[in-house]
Amino acid sequence: MTDGWDPASMTEAELTAYVKEQGWPGFRGNQIYGWLHSKRVQDPQEMKNLPKEIRNALEPELVRVTEWKRLSSKEDGTEKFLFRLHDGQIIETVFMPYHHGNSLCISSQAGCRMGCRFCASTIGGLVRNLTPSEMLGQVYQVVNLTGKRVDSIVVMGTGEPLDNYENLIRFLYLISDPKGYGLSLRAITVSSCGLVPKIRKLAEEGLPITFALSLHATTDAERQELMPVAKSYTLKETLDACRYYFEKTHRRVTFEYSLVKGVNDTKAHAERLSNLLRSMHGHVNLIPVNPIEERDYVRSDADSVQVFKNILERNRINVTIRRSMGRDIDAACGQLRRRAMLEQDEKE
């Protein structure tokens, strides 16, 4: 890829305007758009109804998302893809088959600067934002490589999506375009650690996506220990932003709560969480944390998780326990990418 235009990040109207500027007929923009988003083609030489001049002009400009490594779980069919980008960055994408359809967890950044203590993605910090084409490319490549349709997307992999706001919004419009992949926005979840101004801005977009807040604690002090973002925004400010999101979109919020043994998984924590969320239009997703080498956090045992869930239910809080997927293929977000980048550096 050069530093020029990025065709796969453009809308159909923008592509049409661009090709006209190059002196090509406007309908070539529609054709290019269809090849990129409906047929999911990365190689312009496969775009047979385009003249060679245009195919050659596209060659250095298309963003490639190339398979670097693929791991398949023997336990549940989960597949974790490592994709290599034009600058050598490696990103993670996870394909999860469920009985109700296939879900894909995509990354929004290479690295992350949020510093959450239980997450491997943030070790090493943020390298750069992903472009809309790089987010789309993860979806398109998984569909091409597996031969299976992706029915839902969670933007919950490496990175903080709201820290890459403009590219995220463009990705949402492109992936849901009926002339492209055509995925319903209702089938997309965007997760955030809690950038309050961006949550409110997202609410103003009026998009019918599901918003998920990484909550993980029941007091400001405890949340600050786990998540540095809590030093900028209090629990009250964060939950008020979630209420605003519901008011603007009428979409209930998912509250992600990673359970760490002896840290936030006691009965007292469950009671406090119930009190925090009693008036919220939302749903709690309990996540027994996946251990990572660089941290000393331990996964809550099954009995503690069930007791925690029972307390929430007794307090009339909607709650589920997230099914663990891909535990035998480095399920913790970011740990495989980190290992792959170190391996790549050693080779080079």
Image (cartoon, grey):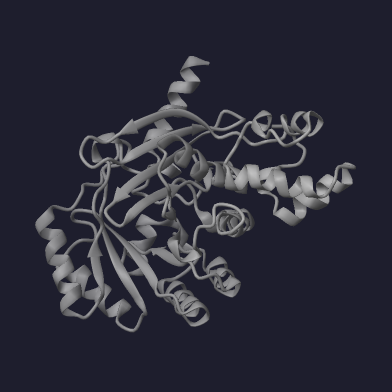
* Whether residue 238 is visible: yes
x then y, percent, for residue 101: 34, 54
State the image coordinates of residue 26 (x, y, percent, origin top left).
82, 49
Tell me where residue 256 appears, x and y as whole percent. 34, 62
Q: Residue at x 61, y 30 (%)?
A: 87
Give the residue at the far top of this rendering.
Answer: 347
Q: 243 above or below 160?
A: below
Establish if 171 lies above or below 276.
Answer: above
Left or right: residue 31 versus residue 282 is right
Q: Is residue 250 left or right of residue 7?
A: left
Quadrant showing the N terminus: top right
Say if 73 sits above or below 271 in the image. above
**Rendered location of residue 65, percent (x, y):** 55, 35
Occupied quadrant, residue 316? bottom left
Residue nearer the viewer, 115 or 15: 15
Extreme-front residue of the structure = 49
Q: Is residue 303 left or right of residue 229?
A: left
Determine the residue positioned at 24% across, 36% down: 328
Quadrant in the rendering for residue 69:
top left
Q: Nearer the viewer, residue 146 or 270?
A: 146
Q: How many marks?
A: 0
Identify whether 128 is placed above or below 216.
Answer: above
